[in-house]
Amino acid sequence: MLDALLGDEEFCQLMKKHGKEVVELLLKRGVHFSVLTNIADVTFEPELPPEIRQNFKPITMFYLAGYTFESTQVYNGMISFEAGFGSHNFGSLVTFPMESILQIIVEEVPIFINLGTASSKKAPKEDKSNGLQRSMSAFLSNPHNQKLIKK
């Protein structure tokens, strides 16, 4: 049931809208923040040199402060900002879809967590018999619960 909700298109659109509203409020109020996102969804213009790009983890955090914060824009479901990378501060325009924001963090505290998991394919329907079997297996894995079952 939870997977169906998290993969529901309407729920995912709600998460995207909420994330956008949080970013816009932080920008409006001048509050510096970090975003955690999947690096596979990020584009860099110009493209980063391989020696810089290879240092990114699959889930990467970008800290928006100073000029990076000032250059941040939200438009057409995208967020973009200018940032410098590496020891030579290689400048690039960073862009990714709003729904790719996994978390928004202010002063090391996550204030937004995107739970939406929509993809191009529909979320599978939950198999209730499989869920019951998993629940029973978890129940029986506790030795104290064994005595509750009649044999």
Image (spheres, grey):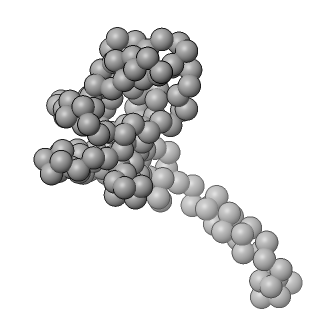
* Residue 40 falls left or right of residue 132: left
| Residue that appears at 40% across and 20% down | 89
Residue in the picture at 77% in, 83% down: 145
Residue 40: where, in percent of width, then height? 46, 26
Q: Residue furthest right?
A: 151
Residue 78 position within the rendered picture, expressed as x and y whole percent measured from the top left: 25, 31
Residue 57 higher or lower than 88, as above or below: below
Between 76 and 8, the one nearer to me in the picture? 76
Furthest residue toward left: 28
Q: Is residue 54 left or right of residue 119?
A: right
The residue at the point 68 percent across, 63 percent down is 134
Residue 59 is situated, as x and y percent measured from the top left of the image, at: 50, 37
Q: Is residue 78 visible?
A: no
Residue 13: x and y, percent?
Answer: 27, 45
Q: Is residue 67 above or below residue 146?
A: above
> In the image, 119: left or right of 9?
right
Q: Does residue 119 appear anywhere in the picture?
A: yes
> For this rendering, which residue is in front, 121 or 73?
73
Total marks shown come to 0
Task: Using the image as rendered, state which of residue 12 and residue 78 is in the foreground.
Answer: 78
Residue drawn at x 18%, y 48% as measured from the top left: 30
Q: Quadrant of the C terminus?
A: bottom right
